[in-house]
Structure formats: C-alpha cells, structure tokens
Image: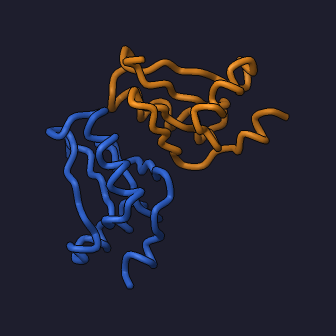
Chain colours: A blue, B orange
Amino acid sequence: MNKSVFYHAGCPVCISAEHDIINLIGANNVEIVHLGEDKGRIAEAELAGVKSVPALLTPNGHVLHINFGASMADVKS
Amino acid sequence: MNKSVFYHAGCPVCISAEHDIINLIGANNVEIVHLGEDKGRIAEAELAGVKSVPALLTPNGHVLHINFGASMADVKS
C-alpha cells in the first residue's frame, strides 16, 4: 500500500478536509473513499482503526483523524 | 504564506502525527512549532483557529485538527 486513503462521509467538514488533503499531498497520492456511498468499505476502515470521519490512513498504517465530522456509528446509520 | 505550520506540544500523539505529516507532505513544506517550548507563538496559533494540538495550519489558512493530543488550555499551563 503506497497511497494514503482518505475516508469521509460527505459531510461539510469532510469535503473541506478532503480539499485540504488533496492540496497538501496531491490527488495522485490519495484514494478518496466515501463511506456513505460505499458502505461495503466501512468494515475495512474500522479494521484500519478509523473511529470517525474524515480520517486519513497513511501508507504506514497510521490513522490521522481530522476535524471531527461524524462517528463511524453515524456513518453506518 | 506558502508553507503549512504544524503546531504541537511534544505529547506522544503529537510526535507520531508530526512524523506522519512530514512523511506525507515533506519536511520542506511544513514549519514545526512546539508550543510548549515556544509559548510566545500560542497567541498566533489561537488566532489562526487552533483549538487543540496537534494541528496543521494549511497555506490557505484552514486548520486541520489531528488526533486529539492536548487542548490549548493544557498547552498554556
């Protein structure tokens, strides 16, 4: 895994953070996953340690939770 | 202002996030400010919108609060 993965759920906080992350690290270096539209990837995100969105999973497996937008429980409902 | 500024306070969460941010955006693209050692810059950080550390101030003035380490009140004490 060489790319980072940015997990979000479409909330305003998420979209703002998404733009900031893309500006900072480049669109080619990050996969964007919308958990609200792609619920099949929620389990993967939780396994990686994502507790809330938006969150950035780094290539070395660390999770950076950024400006709280929604909990994973909110994303599932 | 073209560089990002990473504000932290030396806590373990801060140091881990600092390494991740440097890996992601490059050491040349971010100024690291340790508010515990450089308390003269706390006012500047608060004015920029920093509520807790670690936090990344982007070149366009947005603040990304990352994995809660300490509140600004804790940093001042």
Q: Residue at x 28, y 69 (%)?
A: A35
**Residue A76's spot in the image, x, y percent?**
37, 81
Q: Residue at x 46, y 50 (%)?
A: A66
Task: Specify the farthest residue to the bottom.
Answer: A77
Task: Specify the farthest residue to the top.
Answer: B28
**Residue A42's spot in the image, x, y percent?**
31, 72
Q: Residue at x 22, y 76 (%)?
A: A40
**Residue A74's spot in the image, x, y percent?**
44, 77
Camera-nearest residue between B32 and B11: B32
Q: Quadrant of the N terminus of chain B?
A: top left
Task: Specify the farthest residue to the left.
Answer: A28
Above or below residue B68? Residue B11 is: above
Quarter holding residue A41:
bottom left
Above or below residue A77? Residue A9 is: above
Q: Residue at x 49, y 24 (%)?
A: B5
Locate residue A39 relative to residue B26 in the image: left or right: left
Camera-nearest residue between A67 and B22: A67
Quarter holding residue B38:
top right
